Amino acid sequence: MKDKSNVVAGAAAARGGTNATALNWMGPPMTVTLNEKALTHARGLLRRSEVTVDERDDWSEHAPSTDDENTFIEKNGIAEFAKWHLGEDGDKTEGTKGRYLFPYGDFQTLHRCAVISGESRAGQYNHDSIRDALHDLLEKIDAKAERSSK
């Protein structure tokens, strides 16, 4: 039987943190799927060059705070918030922040550091479609940055 604690730990990691309770919880595995609307949004940001080309470790400083997330939701709604997250946990209640995982930006630009971080976490917890989407975004970000530097 597969150890389900890693799946829950993956949910905590996908939000960018850890949770001791989640690490010890042995409930059913979550259902995380690729948020296609978010992927379309991310690709649009890339097409419009609304990208911050930064390094992997920058995400810890560039990620929106809880207050930033709450303010964004108050102004724009949860549907807009969802567009900034490539993962959606179908086991979580609709209309809640906890439903959306794998953020890729700061509500203004697509961040290379978030894409790198998310790709690693998605691969670690076997969210293959999300990992592949993030990998594709990273390749396109790097190719566009290379073309721009010439």
Image: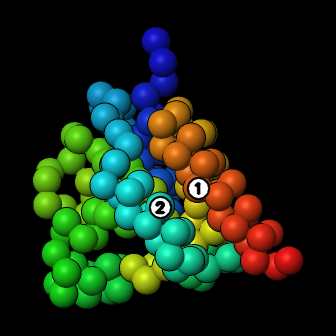
Find out whether the residues at labels 2 and 1 contact each other: C-beta distance under 8 Å: yes
Q: Position of residue 3 (x, y in %)?
A: 48, 24
Quarter of the image that includes the C terminus: bottom right
Q: Is residue 11 something one can see in this rendering?
A: yes
In the image: residue 69, left or right of residue 48: left
Up the image or down, 146 lies above or below 101; here it is below
Which residue position is annotated with label 2?
Answer: 43
**What type is the residue that disc 2 sits on?**
Arg
Q: Residue at x 21, y 47 (%)?
A: 92
Q: How is the image coloured?
A: rainbow
**Image point (47%, 61%), residue name:** 43
Residue 10 placement (x, y as % from top left): 48, 44
User: Mark on residue 137?
Assistant: 1
Instruction: Work out whether residue 25 or residue 31 is closer to the camera in this orientation and state it.
Output: 31
With respect to residue 109, does 144 lie above or below?
above
Left or right? Give the position of 101 relative to 125.
left
Q: Quadrant of residue 131?
A: top right
Look at the picture and state if 21 lies above or below 147. above
Say what secondary structure mark 1 lies in. helix
3 vs 34: above or below: above
Which one is earlier in the sequence, the residue at label 2 or at label 1?
2
In which image quadrant can residue 76 be found? bottom left
- Residue 123 image offset from top left, x and y in percent: 59, 39
Residue at 52% over, 46% down: 133
Q: Which is nearer the eye, 140 or 26?
A: 140
Q: Position of residue 17 (x, y in %)?
A: 49, 62
Image-based side of 33 in relation to 78, left or right: right
Residue 63 seen in render? no
